[in-house]
Image: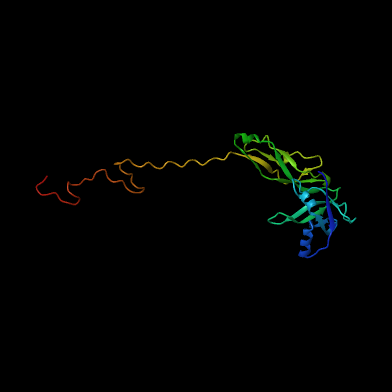
Amino acid sequence: METLNLNCEKRELGTRGKVRALRRTGKVPAVVYGPRTAAMPIAVTGLSLKASVTGDASQRLLRLQAAESDLNGRHVIIKDVQRAPISGEVLHADLYEVDLSAKLTVTVPLRFHGKAKGTADGGILQPLVRTIDVECLPTDIPEAIDVDVTPLGIHEAIHISTLQFGPNVSPVFDSDYALVTVLPPTVEAAPVAAAEAVPEEGAAAAPAEGAEAAPAAEAAAPGKKGEKPEAGKK
């Protein structure tokens, strides 16, 4: 990956008012630190920092450009960036100084390409992760890791152990987790069953659940229920 220059200068810690005044000049407050470096407050050019944190590679290698000899030429990576919640403007940056001869672990993005064969059958390509951790020298930090999804069928997945890395780059993982898969087509809900048919006119309605069916005919005298037959009649 290309090493970018980041213009900067030393600064003094100050109040919020001084920090706001610094930002109005187009600069961003930052801190440089490392395993062998005490934390040092600096101010970096906003445009240079913005170019470093946009795009795929957020942990690219940066070379500090400063008038101060003890700061000029140091190599750093961006460890953290604080942004304004609404505008997204960069408010502060943490820069980690690295040793070019020592390996380190960094997070790099995955770049998916190709058309999965499972999508021809209605499947849906579903990335499960967007970044992975790799170990390498600072000068070998990849811009991104390419993942070809072309051979993926429905219910198939690509795992981290199957990726191809550069000769000096090694993935860091505890379990062989999946990176991307193809989900089956979305199944539409079954249509609602047709409403129960209304009985035809004149047809007897079915008894309610739990109710006993009425007898087919009642064994009763010609008169009303409970009446006695008239005398003399058979």
Residue 7 percent coordinates (x, y): 84, 53
Camera-side residue: 170 or 19? Answer: 19
Camera-side residue: 3 or 196? Answer: 3
Name the quadrant of the N terminus.
top right
Residue 102 percent coordinates (x, y): 85, 48
Residue 217 percent coordinates (x, y): 24, 44
Residue 13 percent coordinates (x, y): 81, 63
Q: Residue furthest right?
A: 69
Q: In this view, does 13 lie above or below 129?
A: below
Quadrant of the rendered image containing residue 120? top right
Name the quadrant of the C terminus.
top left
Q: Is residue 73 above or below residue 148?
A: below
Figure coloring:
rainbow
Quadrant of the rendered image containing residue 86? bottom right
Q: Which residue lies furthest to the front in this view?
A: 25
Camera-side residue: 129 or 49? Answer: 49
- Residue at 76% from the left image edge and 50% from the top image edge: 53
Q: Is residue 63 left or right of residue 123?
A: right
